[in-house]
Image (cartoon, rainbow, N blue to C red):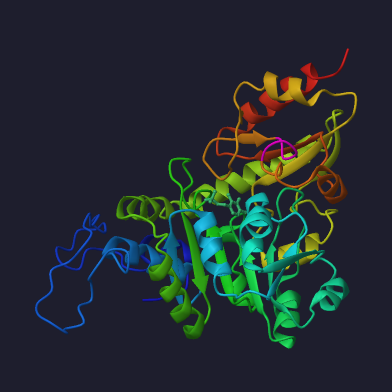
Amino acid sequence: MNYRNIDTALIHGGVSSDPLTKAVNVPVYLTSTFGQSGLRTAPQWEYSRTGNPTRAALEALLAELEHGDRAFAFASGMAAITAVLMLFKSGDRILISKNVYGGTFRVLDKVFNAFKLHYAIVDTQNEQELDKAITKDVKAVFIETPANPLLTVTDLKATAELAHRHGILAIADNTFMTPYLQRPIDFGFDLVIHSATKYLGGHSDLIAGAVISASKELSERLAFIQNSTGGVLDPFNSYLLIRSIKTLGVRMDRHTDNAQALASFLRTDRAVKKIYYPGLEDFPLHEIHMRQAKNGGAMISFELRPEYDIESFFKNLKLITLAESLGGVESLVCHPASMTHASIPKDLREQLGITENLVRLSVGIEDLSDLKADLTQALAKSLKA
Ligand SMILES: *Cc1c(COP(=O)(O)O)cnc(C)c1O
């Protein structure tokens, strides 16, 4: 059943209760295999790599939330990205956005490179550059918007139209926004990817990924790849994700209210040289972002002035934790240059704007004044003597 309102779909979407007992939660089907009634009967469930009822409930929910045809749950975001890359063959080329997730760059550069699946980095904010980059071997454009960590915005509608004009696929990693804030398929995208480890999971307690396909044809190919290569999500984590997604809306509302307030607050702090947040009116492509998303999201990046010491800033934070990852209820900071984007060579990193003094903040759902106080004291203490 498709609900028009996402707040209802988050709770009742997909398979919303156990069809057998009417339990209001989908049970965790901890089983590897299923008994069959006879030979050649084509049972609905046969083996849990191929299909498991708990995972299937999650997949139906994700497909509904992203307005897709089908969804596929994987053991991590990288397993989901890998499955998508397996749609291509040697000799093909994928265009990726500048400052795409470090792991996406790494799997293309270090793993798929050996299979001669090529990539090229393009500024997907610039339509002419993207158009020129689509040579005959290019089979897809892979974007994140806003992209990690400078939150650069790509126009979803224009990108999908351009891709389809050239007969190639448009793929979006929607981890930073979630379907609650932005649905790339509504703008013509063919595939949506999630690291469900982040906002969909929301509590920093699991690793998971997902792919949502817009067409039957892609769904069939992905189902085959998922079953053949086997990077599936287990039933227990599938259950945890269904549980988490029920509160996605209330969490995102609080995350994004806090982020919008913190971005306005941080931009006035003496220590901050530059702030990156798509919810600020003077942020590049703010209007395009607001056309395709509900609000600015909950990720903020900022660069400290050279008089401030980045290491002492991280050391002096008391409430906010220095850690990889994002999207959990607790606020986290990271240092992209040495953490999430360390696998990108230094000169390329600098060229992209990921400087040594850049901080990425994943705004949690704590009390806003406590977050402000923690940032203020850590920034003040990091002024070099
Ligand atoms: C974390 C992340 C990934 C990778 O997901 P894992 O669940 O860590 O494998 C991919 N894309 C983005 C945007 C991410 O933030």
| Start-end of magenta stretch | 335-339
Using the image as rendered, state which of residue 47 and residue 241 is in the foreground. Answer: 47
The x, y position of residue 27, in whole percent, is 23, 56
Image side of residue 56 versus residue 261, left or right: left
- Count of numbered labels shown in the rendering: 0
Quadrant for the C terminus, please. Answer: top right
User: Overall secondary structure of the magenta stretch?
Assistant: loop
On screen, 369 above or below 360?
above
Quadrant assignment for the N terminus = bottom left
Query: Percent position (x, y) of residue 5?
Result: 47, 69
Q: Is residue 336 magenta?
A: yes
Q: Is residue 202 visible?
A: yes
Is 10 displayed left or right of 188 in the figure?
Answer: left
The image quadrant that residue 238 belongs to is bottom left
| Residue found 75% across the figure and 20% down from its top | 312
* Image-quadrant location for residue 137: bottom right
Q: Is residue 309 above or below residue 343?
A: above
Q: Is residue 240 magenta?
A: no
Where is residue 44 drawn, in percent x and y? 23, 76
Q: Horizontal and vertical percent for residue 15?
A: 31, 67
Residue 373 seen in render: no
